[in-house]
Structures are given as structure tokens and as C-alpha cells.
Amino acid sequence: MIEANGLTRTFRAGRQSIAAVRGVDLRVEAGEIVGFLGPNGAGKTTTLRMLTTLLRPTSGTARIAGADLATASREVRRRIGYVAQYGGTDPNALVEEELFLQARLYRIAAAPARRRVAALLEELDLGGLGARPVGSLSGGQRRRLDIALGLVHEPPVVFLDEPTAGLDPHSRNNLWEHTRRLRDDNGTTVFLTTHYLDEADALCDRILVIDHGRIVAEDTPANLKRQLAADVLTVAVVGDPDAAQRLLAGLPGVRQAAVTSTGDIQVTLADGEQGITDVITALSGAGFGVRALQLARPSLDDVFLNLTGRELRDDPRHPSAPIPTTEGTEHVPAR
Ligand SMILES: Nc1ncnc2c1ncn2[C@@H]1O[C@H](COP(=O)(O)OP(=O)(O)OP(=O)(O)O)[C@@H](O)[C@H]1O
């Protein structure tokens, strides 16, 4: 559904040449939800702007929903929805007017446009808000309107730029639910950028990590965690911890075993779920009792740090604690 080869963009800033995106290859299948992550300045926005025809690549090619970016950019625009980080909607316009206008801009005739608006209001949980001025919506409602505006022409692919930035946790969950539904009910392909690793983990089938203009990793969240960060098991044994440590250090699947200052044994495992069984079996076979066990699974933060040497959330523009919106709670209807 999205295929890019060697996508490159260099900017000129005075005498300087800035290689923002340096040969990005990517492939997104129909119906996938793919998260595009990277530290500040990594090249996410530049890539997104190229894929959505807003910026011409310096070199490289891409096809979106079957249309070539360079030779059929108008067709690309027709086949994609793009939800920018800051929607430019007039705050005084009414919600349904905005949607209707957008539908008309896509040359949808008046009667079907009205039907489409009604369906979208329902789909994105905005029923009853059609006659409200856009400026009166809460943060979560506003983001859902932005998404509805991007979906008016029923595009098979939608690009979301930081869809939940600044929303409170409840509104973020609600938006994830809507994004999943887009894919599950309509088969829409979703390509999104995010600064929230928990969002990428919870929502995305696959993650692409970009750093210094190049893709440095791509896989499912689970595989990335397995490959790039380890599970750590802390065991408290009844018996001599040094002897237990020597025993555990020799087990297959154990990368490292060390006795901590409190006399526990910290075991780094390639695969925590399998490893925990092997550790217990080996300890009890050698006559050690087990007083306590604790397994720490890696997070995408660990993966990210390993890959880029940087935290994803070290930018004050993207605080780790989401800024609450005026809306306290939003109802996610049971499905
Ligand atoms: N119009 C421009 N002129 C010059 N340099 C630019 C321009 N746009 C982006 N850059 C540079 O290209 C690099 C990549 O920027 P880009 O905005 O794509 O990163 P990003 O990953 O989206 O970052 P952020 O998370 O901060 O939004 C940065 O070094 C940026 O300063």
C-alpha cells in the first residue's frame, strides 16, 4: 500500500546542506497500522511530507495506493487522508459545515456528501456535536474531527501526524480505539508518527524507527523488544547464592547471571517466559529453594535507547506526561 525506495531529501540552509532523509526504503501492507518513530530531528516529518506530496523528494521513488508519487501526485492526494498535527479549521465554523465543505472539495455531490458527513459523525463518536462550533470542542473531540476530515473521501491509506499529542490518557485510549476500528471495519491502512512509545506498543502492528534520516529498525513491537532488549529475572534463593549463580550462568538461554548486593540473583534472559521455567527447574533439581521471583520485561523505551542512544521523550515540546484537555472523560462505546 505504501512503498518507498531510496527516498532522500536534502535542504539548503544558507551555505549548509542538511541531509534530512537519507535513502529511506519502506513497505507498508494494506490494512497494517504502522508507527513511525524517531528522536527529534530524525526525519519523520520530512518523510511524511514527501509521502503525502507536500514536499518533493531530492531523489528516490514511492508508490502510494498504487499511484506514483512523482508522476501521479494528484492521484496520490485523492487516495490518501492526511491528518496534520495542527488542523487549520476555522474555530467559528460548525462541525458538520466543515465536514460538508471538505466533502464538496473532494467533489462529492451534495446529497452523498450529507450522508457521508452523518456517517462520519457517527463513526467517530461525534454524534450530537454536528451543530457545535469547532472552537467549542474538547481536545479529544477536536482530534476526532481532524481524523473525520481526513476520511471524508474514504481513502484507503491515512497518515496521522502525532494523533494523540497533548491528549489526556482517556482521550488517547479513545483515539486508539477509533484507529483500530478504522482498520478492522474498513481495512484502512494507517501510517502514524508518535512520540509515545506506549502508543506504538499498544496500537501498531509494526514499528519503523528512523534516526539521522535512515531507518534503523523495523519489526513488530514484540520482536523489537525481544531482539533489542532483554528480560531480567530476579531470584531470591534458599541456599548459597554464589553456587546458585554459577549454576544459572551455565544454563542455555541465560545471557548473564550476577549476585546483587542484597544476595538476590539477577538473570538476564534471551526469552523470559521460557527462561523462567528453566531457571526454576534447574534450581529445584540442584536442591535450592526459591523464595521470590520477579520478571521485568523490557519496554520500547529500552529498545529505543539501545538503538539510538537517546530517549524518545527528552523534548520539552513533547512532555512525557500528556497535558490534560478541558474534557475530563470520554466514553468509548462498547463494541
Ligand atoms: N525546511 C527545512 N530547511 C532546513 N532544514 C530542515 C527543514 N525541514 C527540516 N529540516 C531539518 O531536517 C532534519 C529532519 O527534520 P524533521 O522535521 O523531518 O525531523 P522530525 O523527526 O520530524 O523531528 P521532530 O520530532 O522534532 O518533529 C532536521 O535536522 C531539521 O532541522
Image: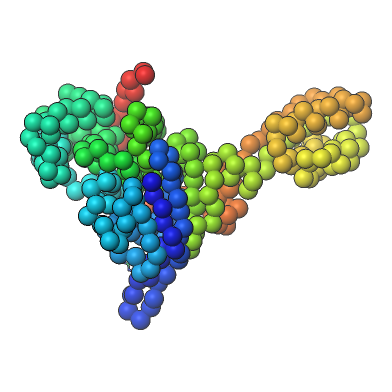
Q: Position of residue 148 (x, y in %)?
A: 24, 36
Look at the picture and state if 272 lies above or below 50: above
Quarter-of-image position of residue 47: bottom left
The residue at 7%/35% (across/down) is 110
Q: Position of residue 59 (x, y in %)?
A: 38, 68
Q: Taking the image as four quarters, which one is ligand 1 found in?
A: bottom left
Look at the picture and state if 208 lies above or below 95: below
Quarter-of-image position of residue 274: top right
Tell which of 324 and 202 is nearer to you.
202
Residue 211 seen by the camera: yes
Q: Residue furthest left?
A: 110
Left or right, 42 with reference to 153: right
Q: Position of residue 147 (x, y in %)?
A: 27, 39
Left or right, 296 with reference to 266: left
The residue at 37%/40% (across/down) is 189
Q: Quadrant of the C terminus?
A: top left
Q: Residue furthest bottom?
A: 15
Tell which of 164 and 235 is nearer to you.
164
The residue at 33%/43% (across/down) is 157
Left or right, 85 with reference to 271: left
The colour mode here is rainbow
Q: Position of residue 270 (x, y in %)?
A: 72, 41
Q: How many marks?
A: 0
Residue 321 seen by the camera: no
The residue at 33%/75% (across/down) is 13
Look at the picture and state if 290 lies above or below 318: above
Tell which of 173 and 187 is nearer to you.
187
